[in-house]
Image: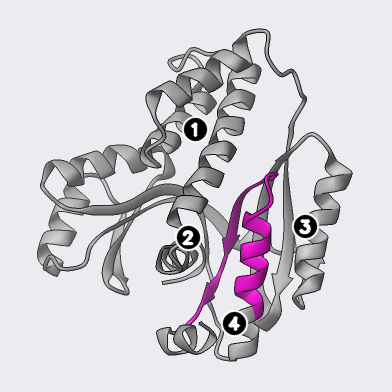
Amino acid sequence: MSGHSKWATIKHKKGAADKARGKLFAKLARQIEVAARQGGGDLESNSSLRNVVLKAKAAQMTKDAIDRAIKRATGEGDTSNYENITYEGYAPGGVAMLVDVLTDNRNRTASDVRSAFTKYGGAMAEPGAVGWQFSRKGVILIDGGIDEDTALTVSLDAGADDVSRDGDSWRVVTDPSSVYEVRDALMAHGIEVQSAESTMVSSTVIEVSDPNDAKQVLRIMDMLEDNDDVQDVYANFDIAESIMQEVG
């Protein structure tokens, strides 16, 4: 298990699920507003909005909250101009990170992202230094208690590209455009889906074996994700459970 999915598991174990969900919903609402403002509020004709709404539904954001965000964007509400920016950087241990932001103040956000890296021993990188090793994939984590043949057969029949072990779960990789369709097919077969998302996956994984480095990596992730402008953080680290317990 590495990077983004690892971090999701860590946050769950830390018991921060409720706080994280509130923060996530606020970020999703902003993404919905921007997509609707740029391409209109019709899901059929606005593919960007449709994808964000699917992401919001997967996170269990309510229909009312989604509709309110769309109405704000297409009505007379906030007209702030947001821009999408991706920052790149390295955390201790050589861990590569991509930071997707949605901001109305580029200077403020750049300063905040840089501070998160430098405060905990990391550094910003030049554009392209990190991004080349990441590609967008659909990633679904399903119940690891089912047998391998069932996981493979049902997932591949549903349209998945690959299935592998991921800690206590099975990791199902799909085309990013079909992740939610595959998720629904798995659920229709009675398989428990733990998470489903369109995310950035690195072609390399960095094993973080030094506890101090591990602690710094997690602090950078925490500080970045606590920033309202930061929409997603992707990383290529793997931290063994024994080290996780050591660093708390």
x and y, in percent, of residue 130 in the image: 69, 63
Amino acid type assigned to the residue bearing label 4 in the image: Ala
Q: Say what secondary structure mark 3 lies in.
A: helix
Q: Earlier in the sequence, mark 2 or mark 4?
A: 2
Residue lying at the far top of the rendered structure: 76
**Foreground: disc 1 or disc 2:** 2
Mark 3 or mark 2: which comes first in sequence? Answer: 2
Q: CA distance from mark 4 to mark 1?
A: 31 Å
- The residue at which mark 2 appears reads as 16
Please name which of the two marks, 1 or 3, marks the residue nearer to the observer: 3
Read off the residue under disc 3: 113
Residue 201 in sight from this viewpoint = yes
- Whichever of callouts 1 and 2 sits on the residue coming sooner in the sequence is 2
* Residue on which disc 4 sits: 214
Q: Are marks 3 and 4 in contact (CB under 8 Å)?
A: no
Specify few, some or many for label 2: CA neighbours under 10 Å numbering under 14, 14-19, or 20 or more. few
Q: What range of the chain is rendered magenta?
A: 216-239
For badge 2, the amino acid type reads Ala
Q: CA distance from mark 3 to mark 4?
A: 19 Å
Q: Earlier in the sequence, mark 4 or mark 1?
A: 1
Q: Is residue 209 above or below residue 127?
A: below
- Whether residue 125 is visible to the viewer of this picture, yes or no, is no
Query: Closer to the camera, 17 or 74?
Result: 17
Q: Nearer the viewer, residue 45 or 210?
A: 210
**Residue at 51% across, 82% down:** 248
Asked whether 226 or 102 is in front, the reply is 226
Residue at image mark 1: 52
Taking 154 as reference, is 78 left or right? right
Q: Give coordinates of residue 70: x percent, y percent.
A: 54, 18
